[in-house]
Image (cartoon, rainbow, N blue to C red):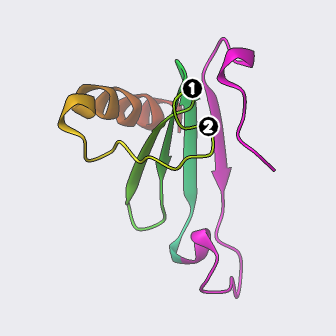
Amino acid sequence: VGSPDPALHTSPLLAEITKGINTPAKQPNSKGDMFTLIADGMQYIRGGKGAEELYDLSASPEQETDLSAAPQDAEVLKRMRDALDRLK
């Protein structure tokens, strides 16, 4: 499928993937609803159990480098987390 092109989005993009009935355990949404927010070239993902992921889509378009634990990106993570909470 590929990753969304951050250059195409001038405003935040929010998506929700809901947990279905009998969702197979291997599916990422098997533990609950998931949300993703794309803004300012970054993608923030919150999994069903609250696990967070953060990606710089220009540096890691295939979401290979998770920045959520990187100290230098703590402020970006907080900003994306707060933005998702406001949009939900």
CA gap, disc 1 and disc 2: 6 Å
Question: In the structure shown, which secondary structural element does the residue marked by tag 1 occupy?
Answer: loop
Residue at the image position 51 percent from the left and 75 percent from the top = 31
Residue at the image position 66 percent from the left and 11 percent from the top = 10
Mark 1 burial class by Cα count in 10 Å: few <14, some 14-19, many 20+? few
Chain part drawn in magenta: 1-30
Where is residue 52 drawn, in percent x and y? 38, 52
User: Label 1 is placed on what type of residue?
Assistant: Ser
Q: Nearer the viewer, residue 13 or 67?
A: 67
Q: Nearer the viewer, residue 46 or 19?
A: 46
Total labels drawn: 2
1 relative position to 66: left or right: right
Q: Give the number of the disc on residue 58.
A: 1
The vertical placement of 5 against 33, above or below, is above
Residue 19 is covered by the magenta coloring = yes
The residue singled out by tag 2 in the image is: 61
| Main secondary structure along the magenta-highlighted residues | loop
User: Label 2 is placed on what type of residue?
Assistant: Pro
55 relative position to 34: left or right: left
Residue at the image position 62 percent from the left and 45 percent from the top = 62
Q: Give the number of the disc on residue 22.
A: none
Q: Are marks 1 and 2 in contact (CB under 8 Å)?
A: yes
The vertical placement of 68 against 41, above or below, is below
Where is residue 83 drawn, in percent x and y? 43, 28
The quarter holding residue 80 reads top left
